Amino acid sequence: MTVRTRFAPSPTGLLHIGGARTALFNYLFARHHGGQFLLRIEDTDRARSTQQAVDAILQGLDWLGLQPDEPPLFQSTRAARHAEVAQALLASGRAYRCYTSADELREMRERAAAEGRPPRYDGRWRDRDPGEAPPGVAPVIRLRAPQQGETVVDDLVQGQVRVRNAELDDMILLRSDGTPTYLHAVVVDDHDMAITHVIRGDDHLTNTFRQAQIFDAMGWERPRFAHIPLIHGADGAKLSKRHGAVSVLEFDTQGFLPEALCNYLLRLGWGHGDAEVLDREQAVALFDLDGVGRAASRMDYAKLTHLNGVWLRQADDARLTAEVMRRLAGTDGVVLDAAARARILALMPGLKERAKTLVELAQSAAFLARRVPLPFDARARALLTEEAGALLSGLAERLAATDFSQAAVDQALRAYAGEAGRTLGQVAQPLRAALTGSTTSPGIDATLAALGREEALARIAQAGV
């Protein structure tokens, strides 16, 4: 058996963090077992489905590196197949036409509410002669669900779960206009796509009992089900906009690396010993459903940010430079030419040691792409005193005589500080202010070497020294 999983979002909104984790778990499970990961866009709600949402889902999955093994299947293109299966159930006696009116359904709901019962269809057309159908009423097709016994699901995360069939009514398969219901379409698509494992949020668990009955009525083998707990905010409430990023692509905007987010989501509800930092290859090797817990997980942005910093320090410098250039585009006073790129790349080893997000990284690298005169923050301006000016004027002459390699400028700084009777810090801090416009940067020798002789001396000169 080839393992085949699927991620099946509805394009009625953006790809949120819970959906991203579901997609990741499906992807990793399939890869771990040498199987295939598929994507189905469940766009049967034509009124609410949008192309913008479809694009956002595809972009989000691509950013996360969760590409499906086959082109996406759009559920709306399969209405004829959904109807065909419903008609087959009708022909076999496992479904029936129901002519209950909207008013009658409303009365059922009101009566159930008054009696403290959940609203359920009462089966009035289950065994009734269709010849009694009122004229001009288009029927729905309902499943003739079992009324005795239980429907049992051996869930790979939740364990064995069961429901009394008396608690389930005869669900609608086809509406009166011939369109399929969501629960019916999902079953047909999962069967036709040869899905072996359905891994989804535990908010779908109640749907599974109804869907299992359709599989059974058609004589189809059920897929194995695995319902994973939802993700909550740090306060224990369901994730919402007030908890931070909602769309996966917002995490890109906020400066998170996709591998860091995937690593975090992997560990959010799944564990393998003390393993914390896992790349994709390691995740595929280790992931299986027996490591998924049953309790809801809580989103911890501080932990995600810390983990992102770990991944930043491991990331390729050229890739990070490209990210910085992208994020600095359009910034006032910044010129993103080849010289700026070379400086950022040269200083990236030091820059990425200090940053937790790509936003922070871009902010800390911006000075390398600025043209003189530089803007100075208040602390930098306070360091550039008349005394500092005299000190830096002599230092500029000493630096100009070097080849501006990191080792050479470091030696020159130390020698000049000693001759001037100052500590290295007393020389380096006003120099850093003149070079960057702030009081923070990677090592001053690395900063000088990245700027180069011409740029560094120009900045010292424009600082008023």
Image (cartoon, rainbow, N blue to C red):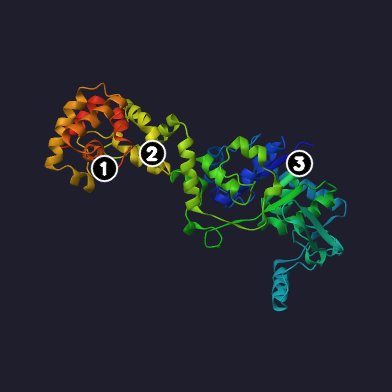
Q: Nearer the viewer, mark 2 or mark 1?
A: 1
Q: Is residue 428 left or right of residue 114?
A: left
The amino acid type, in three-letter code, at marker 2 is Arg
Cα separation, mark 2 vs mark 3, equals: 44 Å
> Is 22 situated above or below 62?
below
* Residue 38 appears anywhere in the view: no
The amino acid type, in three-letter code, at marker 3 is Asp
Q: Is residue 245 left or right of residue 391?
A: right
Q: Are marks 2 and 1 in contact (CB under 8 Å)?
A: no
Residue 160 at x, y percent in the picture? 78, 57
Mark toward the start of the polypeptide (2 vs 3):
3
The residue under the point 52% across, 46% down is 248
Residue 265 at x, y percent in the picture? 57, 47
Cα separation, mark 1 vs mark 3, equals: 62 Å
Q: Nearer the viewer, mark 1 or mark 3?
A: 1
Q: Is residue 149 left or right of residue 392?
A: right
Q: Which mark is residue 192?
A: 3
Judging depth in this view, the residue of 317 and 50 nearest the camera is: 317
The residue singled out by tag 1 in the image is 438
The residue singled out by tag 2 in the image is 327
